[in-house]
Amino acid sequence: MNPYEVLGVPADAAKDVIRRAYRRMSKRAHPDGGGSPERFALVKRAHDLLTDDARRERLDRTGDDSEAQPDNAMAMALQNLNAALDEVLGEIEKQGREPHKVAGLEKLIAGKLKARKAKVAEDVKAMHVAIAKNELLLGRFTTDGENRMEMIVQNRIRLVHGLIENTRIVTKALEDAIAIVEAHGFRADAEPPRQPVSLMNSYFNMTTTPW
């Protein structure tokens, strides 16, 4: 698979160009838009590869387009989508409106996800500031014995670095969630088509845990 060809973007395409191409191509590739599950999965895989810096670098350097080890990335994306949808529905209902009559519902959901992503980015900036402040303390505590204060400062720095790494996972899940919802439209006050049972089962298999 050549992901650049799948999305119709040049090899030096920036992430925003790739995401716009994904939104456009995913609508065409989706079964509801005349595509097929296989084509939709291919477009999604191309997007995931080209928006993952490490995988894209490996692809460009070696031609290896293999996927990362299976993880809970999709589950995290769906959890974020569920949370954003709950928040939007709650706000709409507080306004005395009926959600199914609200045009642009998908844009409201995407807006919540983007606001969450922006908040995470602000948190990361604050973490980098905290690291810089702690690094200024390194080597300044003196003692004739074991330098426990130096150890404390080092541990503080390591802890914040770990938190930053966790935010990368959160940000990726939010980006995936945004890409998913932006690949959808919303027909306000329209009779929705009945979803195939297979599609519903697929969703529940991804989002539920057997007891």
Image: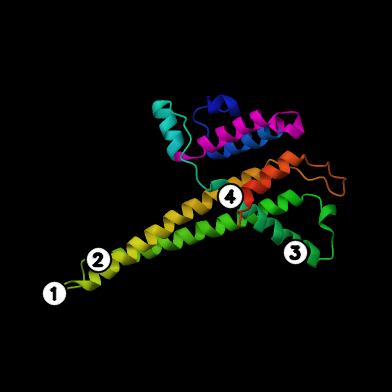
Query: Which amino acid lies under the numbered mark 1 shown in the image of this protein?
Result: Gly
Residue at x 59% of width, y 26% of height: 6
Whether residue 8 is visible: no
Q: Is residue 171 visible?
A: yes
Q: Main secondary structure of the magenta part?
A: helix
Dots 3, 1 in contact, CB < 8 A: no
Q: Residues within 10 Å of mark 1 (few under 14, many from 20)?
A: few
x and y percentages locating residue 152 in the rendered image? 28, 70
Residue 46 coordinates in the image, percent (x, y): 56, 32
Q: Which residue is mark 3?
A: 91
- Quadrant occupied by the C terminus: bottom right
Please state the extent of the stretch shown in magenta in the rendering: 28-53
For marks 2 and 3, give the one nearer the viewer: 3
> Is 50 within the magenta?
yes
Indicate which disc, 2 or 4, sits on the residue closer to the N terminus.
Answer: 4
Residue with the mark numbered 4: 75
Instruction: Say if 103 sits above or below 9 in the image.
Output: below
Q: How is the image coloured?
A: rainbow
Q: Nearer the viewer, mark 2 or mark 4?
A: 4
Q: Residue at x 40, y 63 (%)?
A: 129
Q: Mark 3 against mark 4, which lies toward the viewer?
A: 4
Q: CA distance from mark 1 to mark 2?
A: 16 Å
Q: Earlier in the sequence, mark 3 or mark 4?
A: 4
| Separation (CA) of disc 2 from disc 4 | 40 Å
Q: Contact, CB < 8 Å: mark 1 with mark 4?
A: no
Q: Residue at x 42, y 62 (%)?
A: 127
Question: What residue is shown with label 2?
Answer: 138
Give the crowd class for mark 3: few <14, some 14-19, many >=20 residues within 10 Å: few
Mark 2: amino acid: Leu
Question: Which mark identifies residue 198?
Answer: none
Q: Which mark is residue 145?
A: 1
Which type of secondary structure does the marked residue at label 1 adopt? loop
